[in-house]
């Protein structure tokens, strides 16, 4: 698919991987990008082809109203974290925190279910999972469970919605505002969590965006996962 002149909906398009994707799609000549999140104004985005929309992916009524308002479109991307994430061993974990980590899955499934009817038949969907889905390190069980569910959802849905394509982009550790540490603490954190990867540094949001763009442009892929993980899976 040629991105030029396309109408694109990007949930979580106001920070980190999503923000980088909004900017790249804008520069590539998309007709309109709806960059959506709960507090989109914090992104300070001002491109003529980008419209900021304030919506929570967990609010079905707001999503329905949004899709009704915008009509037909070409690409649906969801990179919204959905809410909090539980970190740590399962047996020490607060079960509410574990369950809340699945808000990402519910956000993804809400937007696909409520937005699919208006997606053009030659259109496509890209969802963002994460490396723990297929190689879980200690303390990442909630991330692994949710990521695994997101990937199974996408693979299974591909056959049901053809010719519309759906693919996953799976990042490893990426330097984004999702991690709120600053200065030396931030540098130490990223050094520590990436030291065993084949490429021992955090990825950049733009490196994940390149894979999202590829998943949109390549009309011969569906039901698959593209890893952008600095060699996490092979380490
Ligand atoms: N960064 C990493 O190391 C990493 C690794 C593996 C996977 N991932 C995945 O990559 C995706 C993007 O992560 P990121 O690092 O770019 O995170 P980020 O910088 O924290 O951005 C997350 C975005 O999601 C939006 N969002 C969160 N909950 C929402 C909700 N309920 N409704 C609407 N929008 C919501 C946020 O905006 P508001 O706060 O304004 O709502 C923000 O725009 C996520 O699915 C994450 O799990 C990231």
Image (tube, helix red, strand yellow):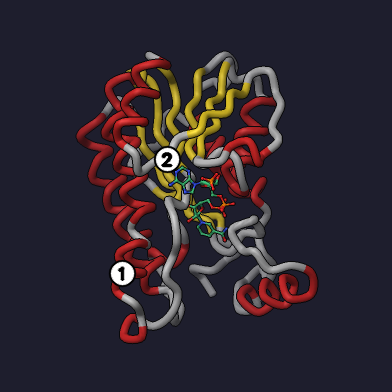
> Does mark 1 have its CB less than 8 Å from ligand 1?
no
Question: In the rendered view of the protein, which quadrant contains the C terminus?
Answer: bottom right
Q: Position of residue 12 (x, y in %)?
A: 51, 42
Q: How many marks?
A: 2
Name the residue at 65% across, 41% down: 42
Dot 2, how many residues are within 10 Å of its Cα: few (below 14), some (14-19), or many (20+)?
A: many
Name the residue at 47% across, 63% down: 131
Dot 1, how many residues are within 10 Å of its Cα: few (below 14), some (14-19), or many (20+)?
A: few
> Does mark 2 have its CB less than 8 Å from ligand 1?
yes
Q: Nearer the viewer, residue 187 or 220?
A: 187
Q: Position of residue 87 (x, y in %)?
A: 45, 74
Q: Position of residue 232 (x, y in %)?
A: 54, 68
The kind of secondary structure element at disc 2 is loop
Quadrant housing residue 65? top left
Judged left or right of residue 107, residue 7 is right
Judged left or right of residue 44, residue 126 is left
Name the mark on residue 132: none
Q: Is residue 63 above or below residue 15?
A: above
Mark found first going from the N terminus, 1 or 2: 2
Name the residue at 39% across, 24% down: 66
Whether pointer 1 and pointer 2 mark residues with C-beta atoms closer than 8 Å, the reply is no
Name the mark on residue 96: 1
Dot 2 corresponds to which residue?
56
Q: Nearer the viewer, residue 62 or 5?
A: 62
Q: Position of residue 15 (x, y in %)?
A: 61, 45
- List the single residue furthest toward the right: 183
The kind of secondary structure element at disc 1 is helix
- List the single residue furthest toward the left: 160
Alpha-carbon distance for marks 1 and 2? 20 Å
Q: Is residue 196 above or below residue 212?
A: below
Q: Is residue 168 above or below residue 102?
A: above
Q: Nearer the viewer, residue 217 or 110?
A: 110
């Amino acid at each position: 698919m040629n991105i030029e002149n396309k109408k694109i909906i990007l949930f979580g398009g106001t920070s980190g991987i999503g923000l980088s994707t909004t900017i790249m799609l804008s520069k590539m000549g998309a007709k309109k990008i709806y960059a959506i999140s709960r507090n989109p104004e914090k992104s300070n985005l001002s491109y003529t082809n980008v419209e900021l929309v304030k919506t929570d992916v967990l609010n079905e009524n707001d999503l329905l109203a949004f899709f009704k308002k915008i009509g037909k479109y070409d690409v649906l991307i969801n990179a919204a974290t959905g809410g909090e994430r539980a970190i740590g061993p399962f047996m020490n974990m607060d079960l509410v925190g574990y369950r809340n980590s699945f808000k990402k899955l519910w956000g993804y499934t809400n937007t696909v279910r409520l937005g699919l009817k208006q997606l053009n038949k030659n259109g496509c969907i890209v969802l963002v999972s994460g490396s723990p889905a297929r190689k879980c390190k200690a303390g990442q069980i909630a991330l692994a469970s949710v990521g695994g569910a997101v990937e199974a959802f996408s693979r299974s849905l591909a056959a049901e919605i053809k010719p519309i394509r759906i693919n996953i982009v799976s990042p490893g550790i990426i330097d984004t505002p999702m991690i709120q540490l600053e200065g030396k603490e931030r540098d130490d954190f990223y050094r520590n969590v990436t030291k065993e990867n084949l490429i021992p540094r955090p990825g950049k949001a733009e490196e994940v965006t390149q894979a999202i763009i590829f998943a949109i442009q390549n009309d011969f892929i569906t039901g698959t996962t593209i890893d952008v993980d600095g060699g996490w899976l092979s380490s």
